[in-house]
Image (tube, coloured by chain):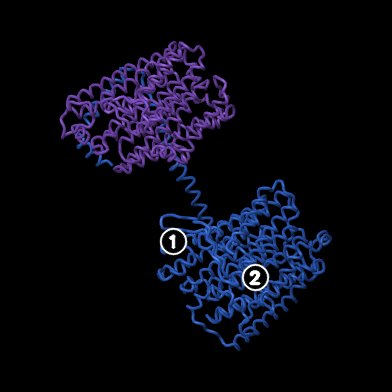
Amino acid sequence: MNNLVFLVPLFPLIGFLINGLGRKSLAKQAIGAIGSASILASFVVSIILFLQVKSSGAIIANYFNFIDVASLKIPFAFQIDQLSSLFLLIITGIGFLIHLYSTAYMTDEEAPHYARYFAYLNLFVFSMLLLVMGGNYVIMFIGWEGVGLCSYLLIGFWFKNDAYNYAAKKAFIMNRIGDLGFLLAVFWLINKLGTVTYGEVFANIGKLSHQDITIITALLFVGAMGKSAQLPLYTWLPDAMAGPTPVSALIHAATMVTAGIYMVSRSNLLYTLAPATQGFIAIIGLATALFAATIALKQNDIKKVLAYSTVSQLGYMFLGLGVGAYTGAVFHVMTHAFFKALLFLGAGSVIHAMHHEQDIRKMGGLKKYLPITNITFLLGCLAIAGVPPFSGFFSKDEILAAAYEKNPILYFLGVAGALMTTFYMFRLYAMTFLGKFRGTHEQEHHLHESPSAMTIPLTVLAILAVVGGFIGIPEVFAKDSHWLESFLAPVFAGSKALTEQKVSSHSTELMMMGVVTGLVLVTIAITWNKFSKYEATTTEETGLGKVLENKWYIDELYNAIVVNPLDALAGFFKNVIEKSGIDGIVNGVGTFINYSSRQLRLIQSGQVGAYILMMVLSMLGILLLWINDSTIVHFLHKIF
Amino acid sequence: MNAIILSALCGVVMMFSGILLKNKSAIKYVAIAALLVLIIGNLFQFYGIYTIDIDSKGLLSFDRTGLFFNTIIFVATLAYFILSGSDIERAGPDVAEYFALIFFVLCGVTILTSFNGLLMFFIGIEILSIPLYILTGSDKKNLKSNEASLKYFLMGSFSTGILLMGITLIYGATGSFGLQSTTIKSAVTGFSSAGILAPVGLVLLFISMCFKVSAAPFHFWAPDVYDGAPSVFTSFMATIVKAAGFFAFIKLFAAKSEDFGPGPAWKLILFVIIVATLFIGNITAVFQQSVKRMLAYSSIAQAGFMLFALYSTNDFTKDGILLYTAAYSFATIGIFSILTKMEDYSLDGFNGLSKSQPVLAFTNTVFFLSLSGIPLTAGFFAKYYMLASAIKGGGSLSLVIIAVLFAAVSVYYYFKVIQAMYFKEGVAATNTPITGNFKVALIVLAAIIVILGIYPTALLGFYYF
């Protein structure tokens, strides 16, 4: 089955090439068909590979030596095991739905831009596939950089708007800061082990000192912080909402931002051996989850709320990783991909209907105009809030249960975050779909349900968001019912063997579930009641509300402590060191050579007598040089 | 032996062809045919087939390096004939004689690649030099050409005098014209252990060879002669003749020291001469407004790089000088063939050539890139081998650094021509219409340079197998 593996990334690459090169000549229908079909083909192959892995274990496909220098050999290899085959299904499956959705959503674009959009989107899927399929850290890094690039290209897709370009640059630079950590970790591995292939690294893990492992894992996590938008590198993700909404759904919610989770789960053995890093990850994850949730409480842009919600949910996943619940984190990646893609696409449908209005204060009462969007969005909200039996309940519960085993404080803070999630999601839902319409008459006149290319993906995702959790039913309800855990067991076996199992009693677990569910339902009721009657007011927020509305002034803080000093330093280098120092030296050398040239030219006087005289003198000089060789050599040695 | 006899015979044939053939172009084709015969004859010997074999009583000895070098020289001459043949026709009325003289020069080259003693060495040098004095003055009605010829002759005689003096002193010390004498060995390694005669003789020999290859401070003749001679013959002198001079120089000094490296004294002198040559060649070229005169100084600068082959003798050196000869000769022949077609030899004369003659401008760019030593051209590996040999053979890092810095200076004046061709407005005029054949030949030459720049072992592989 090895021969099928390369097809998975090949299809999107071909799609990218066709759409990218033919963007001036292809018709829109053809562009959309090529873009979507290439992902669908990948999805089909992914299913085959998934079944293959399920029945007979991991596939490792070696193609050629990517780097072969001295003793270092880095093969171009793909590794399809339980973890990566699961991610393949998520990426290509959701990717396909979003491509399909985009064919309708982007229909207002002119053909060349339409083609550019699909080319970028296909290139993104290609890079993401490399990231998860790569058999070593270097191939992963290629994909890691590729998705960063595509994210940049797609955030700045409407490049005529300066603010969007600024957002794109911000995303790229923030990611690069993280990438540096990743790169250093790879160098560290090469230096200590001489290999970056997963299997070899994990087999030779004993050769690494405890300190090495801590440093490598910490550096890798810095990479994850950038890519998965954790404190303090999260600020790019909300700004990334400048891109088209399907891009936000695919890249900034369902796939790319989960790359950090994938990488940590892939390296789980390293992390399990570095408890210090694990503790750090848990704290960062939890802090991000809470911090982003507080900001989301006061946002009024429909996409911004979802963006902070994504940051917050990613925080939960890292909390899971930090407390050793690798399966739980991967589970949450999957369910989150379902419901967050659903929410974003739903938001896109709303924005589409509202003619690019994104402020929820100007919406309301959309329930009757957009029935399908309304139902699916509500299901998505229930899923993310963790109402049983929707998918978010199972995955979030698993993470929180693991956190409780580690430290009850983590658990209680996590629950607080979950309640905030419920609050802002239902605030969003109620202000958008309930109450009465607050927009202009013209907008109201044009309100309409989106075309089927958009509603079909919504429906499919809604079904997944509802039932997706059943692949991981906790032990409490039925023995051996956690299908996902047994499927992923080979990947996390090494870590599991190293950690002692501490299982809280079933009654505690059931009680916690019951309390949390009750609290969530109460929150929903309060929020629903409060915001369905929302009226536009002009009063400004004060106190904490204002701080939250302005996102804790983090962007301003970064500007003050990082951006402005760097600008000042750059100005100093440019105006002082560059202009008077470096330019002076460079121009000085040039002037000196020109001057010498003008003078030296005069020796060539044209008179044979003078030439011969100079030659005779030179001859004498050479003879003297030779005879007094030792003294001169001695003299020269003193100089050089 | 094939090449020596055949080249002399070809010269005689060319002289008669001037009487028998009235059509100038026909003479050119006869010359090309004769050269092809010469190349084939030389290859025969290269692969061990001696068609003409005369016992020279040990005065001449043939080795693969020498025969391979002959091949490079003949192929370069072929390129020269094809590209510049029509310019030779226009240089003056006695076309056949010019070709004959060129063949006599080639005869001198073949002797210089196979001499086995100072006597044949001297004869080779003189056979090489005398036709050049005539070629320099071939533009009889032009005062500059006459002046250059006379200057060249005067200074050439002076250096021949020094050469003869050196040979005499060595003969006096060793009683032989051979090079295997133990006295010379000790003279090469140091001064104090030998008598006064042989070492001084060697120094004189060295100085006269520096003159022939226009190494500073014995380079004074080169700018005036190269500038004054008809461009088409400057091209020949600056490339083929200079390369041959180098080969003889190295054969005389380095090839004989396979079993004893140059002593510290020689290294010091060479260090001084290399630095002086690089300095004067590169720095003076910067300010030149005439491309022809700039190329004259550039040929001095390139000589500085070729002298590296004397500085250190190891595996890199032999490969390096062969590659350098090929890269430098091909590029310079190409540039001169374009230059002779230009109406105005000044830098401004090249303004806007890319618009009027894109093929000429592009190939000229490739040639200049190769001379500057930019990667993907033969010039890069040529310089690389030379510098690598200097580091490998004794580690004179300071010399290598100086050479690299001067290579950077050379980029400035070479690129001025590229800049004029591509980025300046103007109407670069040619003095004759450019034919399709000429363009094809230029492209082939440029392609060879690029191929050697990607795959230098193509040339060296031919040498070893």
Question: In which quarter of the view is residue B275 placed?
Answer: top left
Q: Colour of chain A?
A: blue
**A461 relative to B6, above or below:** below
Residue drawn at (61%, 73%) of the image: A331
Give the residue number, with chain letter if any, for mark 1.
A190
Instruction: Please tell me whether mark 1 or mark 2 is closer to you in this view.
Output: 1
Image quadrant holding the N terminus of chain B, namely top left
Q: x and y percent of residue B381 in the render?
A: 42, 39
Which color has been applied to chain B in this rendered view?
purple
Residue A344: horizontal and vertical position, in percent? 69, 65
Q: Chain of mark 1?
A: A
Residue A336, label in figure: 2
Considering the image in quadrants, where does the C terminus of chain B appear? top left
The amino acid type of the residue labelled 1 equals Ile
- Residue beneath the point at 49% across and 13% down: B21
Q: Locate residue B351, reporting x and y percent.
A: 54, 27
Query: What secondary structure is marked by label 2?
Result: helix
Residue B135 horizontal side relative to residue A82, left or right: left
